[in-house]
Image: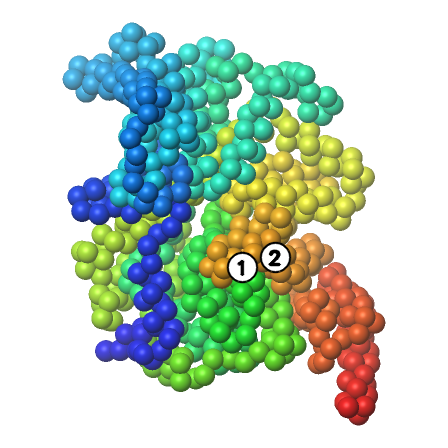
């Protein structure tokens, strides 16, 4: 039976895929071997298996499950990811300060851990829910101090060896287990006293330790930006009495604040709730597709369909990112998954490195608005708004199509403008052979069918995962015990960044809830907008993009929804429209300079300048910026209307983004003059509202512009 590679086994595409698989991980991720590898891999497998077991077979109390998810993620994160870039440099001789700092960190951390062990041991051995008071009172300061010293030690005395975990990071893993272990043990009491004057000092020290550990892991996995933003919010909780105007609040002492922030009002709130259920489930599903080579089939299909067309590899990036976005849904993850193949091929047919990276970044960003998974955005939106998940997925279909069409138009027009060619058919997978393996789409079909059939999201993801394993037995890449092990390990590793990011976002959301800044900011927004919905949406767009520049989309949406959405809804905008508007722009922020995470990932693959790449990716995605305003003016774009109305707004939206794409590229069946570009721009903008009159104006402008352009091109050809 042919494999997913049999479209053309000798093609350069296949060779590049093999090369990518062989490349070692970069950055601060450690590469283990031998016994260390199997120990870490087994821990990752246990982490994934634990979640699958709890979600499907053995339900666990909510707080205990979320804390286990967070604690396990922290432990694995510190064991796998170093404090700094690992370049294999051999460790030198330790200085006295190095040894002293490490010794103090070890003393504090191990003492704190020992006290938590005493508390749990007392419960196991004596079945007593009342722990020794001396253990409870004495663990906090040593544990916090030891963890803080271990973090500082990693900054000052970096261990750049790739093959082993540094002693400081082992201490951080131990501190994570201790802090989370305390909160799990006292979960019932904390639910009653957290954030209250009766909160205990031990509650504060455990929570403070957890907060600094979350901040450090977030720095390692997602960069400083989100950590700084979370730090500003934490500082705001204490500095409120001295701040002016709308920012002023009464302030909170450390005991009340930190005990409050480590509850389901903060760190254990909606982001971690989604991370511990839907996100990890679908990340493991994506890992199953990768381990079974089913995901690779999606990319091969995209190459077979579009690889030979003008600018073929760029169009492949659009198609492949759409397909991978169904299961992946992270901007940077999509860039790496598809860009490792498409970027080198785009460069080969004539694209500049920064253009190749920009196209891939803009295309991959759409993965987060691509149903049914939407990069966890749909799950968080459902959690925050109470709108059924299925309704959100329905609403996302047309905006996602319009987004990918806008990127496709930009790519196609650029290919016309610069006379880009496609790849030779001889180097591409054969579509006919790939169609014989169309059963490899079964996991996606099962997922979508189960969702629309009314099964729970957890059940749908599990069924799709099982289907991927079963389908693999129809190919040479059968999933046996080893492949299951690899998939579960990969799923855990892919989840760690999202665990850290969601926990950090929970800190911000907790501060917003505690201080009430969200409602006050909404009041200011309403005042500035002066009851104008469109002006309020413009402010919402700006805030969503700015937040998204500094943090991943999931966190940016969660924070923006807490701060902005209530004000917009109070102006009469439908909750689904308001939240989807905010989410859409939080997604687009991944290609908006100066901090464009998806563009930076593409620049790393292409070897281009990150800032120039982010500017060009912004240009390529520019036409998509009008899409949220389209569904604000017309609910039919969110599938809220009759069939004729939905068809009308979809067609006119496509025409609108095409006109805008042509205006941005300066090419409309030939080089466009300034006047033609203005006409195209006005025609595209006229399509935003979705009304018959404005659409008629837009179509009229488009026809007039076409006639003018046709005459200009004909006149120019005659002169030549």
Q: Which mark is residue 422?
A: none
Q: Position of residue 433 (x, y in %)?
A: 34, 81
The residue tagged with tag 1: helix, strand or loop? Answer: loop
Q: Position of residue 700 (x, y in %)?
A: 81, 75
Are the two marked residues, 2 and 1, in contact with CB atoms closer than 8 angstroms? yes
Nearer the observer, 255 or 148: 148
Would you name the residue on which mark 1 appears? 608
The residue tagged with tag 2: helix, strand or loop? Answer: helix
**Which residue is drawn at the image coordinates 59% and 47% (left, top)?**
595
Can you see residue 269?
Answer: no
Quadrant of the rendered image containing residue 40:
top left
Q: Position of residue 509 (x, y in %)?
A: 54, 32
Q: Is residue 136 left or right of residue 227?
A: left
**Which residue is drawn at the image coordinates 40% and 39% (left, top)?**
84
Considering only vertical position in the picture, is 545 above or below 663?
A: above
Considering only vertical position in the picture, is 180 above or below 387?
A: above
**Which residue is drawn at the image coordinates 38% and 19% (left, top)?**
144
Considering only vertical position in the picture, is 18 above or below 600?
A: below
Q: Position of residue 475 (x, y in %)?
A: 25, 71
Quarter of the rendering occupied by the N terminus: bottom left
Q: Is residue 365 left or right of residue 59?
A: right
Would you name the residue on which mark 2 appears? 612
Graded by Cα atoms within 10 Å as few (under 14), some (14 to 19) or many (20 or more), the crowding at tag 2 reads some
Q: Is residue 564 left or right of residue 288?
A: right
Quarter of the rendering occupied by the C terminus: bottom right
């Amino acid at each position: 039976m042919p494999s997913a590679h049999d479209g053309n086994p000798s093609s350069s595409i296949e060779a590049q895929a093999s090369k990518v698989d062989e490349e070692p991980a970069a950055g601060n991720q450690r590469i283990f071997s031998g016994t260390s590898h199997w120990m870490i891999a087994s821990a990752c497998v246990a982490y994934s298996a634990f979640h699958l077991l709890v979600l499907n077979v053995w339900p666990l109390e909510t707080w205990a499950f979320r804390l286990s998810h967070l604690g396990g993620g922290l432990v694995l994160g510190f064991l796998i990811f170093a404090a700094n870039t690992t370049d294999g440099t051999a460790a030198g001789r330790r200085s006295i300060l190095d040894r002293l700092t490490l010794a103090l960190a070890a003393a504090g951390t191990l003492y704190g851990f020992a006290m938590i062990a005493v508390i749990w041991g007392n419960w196991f051995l004596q079945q007593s829910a009342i722990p020794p008071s001396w253990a409870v009172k004495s663990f906090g300061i040593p544990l916090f101090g030891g963890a803080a010293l271990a973090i500082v030690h990693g900054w000052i005395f970096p261990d750049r060896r790739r093959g082993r975990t540094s002693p400081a990071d082992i201490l951080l893993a131990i501190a994570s287990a201790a802090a989370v272990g305390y909160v799990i043990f006292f979960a019932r009491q904390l639910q009653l006293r957290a954030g209250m004057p009766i909160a205990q000092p031990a509650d504060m020290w455990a929570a403070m330790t957890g907060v600094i550990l979350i901040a450090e892991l977030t720095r390692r996995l997602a960069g400083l930006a989100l950590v700084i933003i979370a730090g500003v919010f934490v500082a705001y909780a204490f500095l409120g009495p001295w701040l002016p105007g709308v920012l002023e609040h009464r302030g909170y002492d450390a005991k009340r604040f930190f005990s409050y922030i480590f509850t389901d009002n903060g760190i254990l709130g909606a982001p971690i709730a989604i991370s511990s259920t839907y996100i990890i489930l679908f990340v493991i599903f994506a890992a199953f597709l990768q381990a079974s080579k089913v995901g690779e089939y999606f990319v091969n299909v995209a190459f077979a369909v579009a690889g030979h067309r003008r600018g073929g590899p760029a169009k492949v990036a659009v198609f492949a990112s759409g397909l991978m976005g169904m299961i992946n849904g992270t901007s940077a993850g999509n860039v790496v998954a598809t860009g490792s193949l498409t970027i080198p091929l785009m460069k080969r047919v004539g694209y500049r490195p920064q253009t190749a990276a920009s196209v891939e970044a803009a295309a991959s960003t759409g993965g987060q608005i691509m149903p049914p998974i939407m990069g966890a955005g749909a799950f968080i939106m459902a959690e925050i708004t109470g709108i059924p998940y299925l309704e959100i997925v329905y609403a996302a279909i047309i905006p996602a199509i319009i987004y990918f069409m806008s990127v496709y138009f930009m790519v196609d027009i650029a290919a016309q403008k610069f006379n880009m060619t496609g790849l030779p058919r001889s180097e591409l997978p054969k579509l006919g052979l790939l169609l014989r393996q169309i059963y490899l789409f079964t996991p996606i079909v099962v997922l979508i069918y189960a969702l629309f059939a009314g099964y729970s999201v957890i059940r749908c993801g599990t069924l799709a995962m099982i289907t991927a394993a079963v389908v693999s037995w129809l190919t040479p890449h059968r999933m046996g015990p080893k492949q299951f092990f690899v998939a579960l390990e990969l799923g855990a590793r892919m989840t760690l960044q999202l665990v850290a990011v969601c926990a950090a976002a929970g800190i911000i959301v907790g501060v917003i809830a505690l201080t009430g800044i969200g409602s006050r900011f909404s009041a200011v927004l309403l005042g500035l907008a002066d009851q104008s919905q469109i002006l309020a949406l413009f402010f919402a767009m700006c805030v969503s993009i700015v937040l998204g520049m500094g943090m991943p989309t999931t966190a940016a949406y969660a924070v923006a929804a807490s701060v902005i959405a209530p004000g917009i809804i109070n102006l009469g905008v439908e909750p689904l429209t308001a939240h989807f508007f905010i989410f859409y722009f939080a997604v687009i922020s991944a290609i908006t300079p100066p901090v464009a995470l998806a563009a930076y990932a593409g620049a790393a693959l292409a070897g281009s300048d990150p800032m120039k790449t982010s500017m060009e990716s912004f240009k390529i995605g520019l036409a998509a910026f009008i899409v949220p305003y389209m569904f604000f003016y017309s609910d039919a774009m969110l599938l809220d209307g009759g069939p004729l109305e939905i068809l009308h707004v979809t067609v006119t939206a496509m025409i609108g983004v095409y006109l805008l794409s042509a205006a941005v590229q300066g090419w409309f069946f030939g080089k466009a003059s300034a006047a033609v570009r203005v006409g195209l721009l006005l025609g595209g903008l006229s399509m935003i509202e979705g009304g018959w009159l404005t659409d008629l104006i837009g179509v009229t402008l488009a026809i007039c512009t076409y006639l003018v352009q046709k005459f200009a091109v004909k006149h120019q050809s005659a002169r030549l």
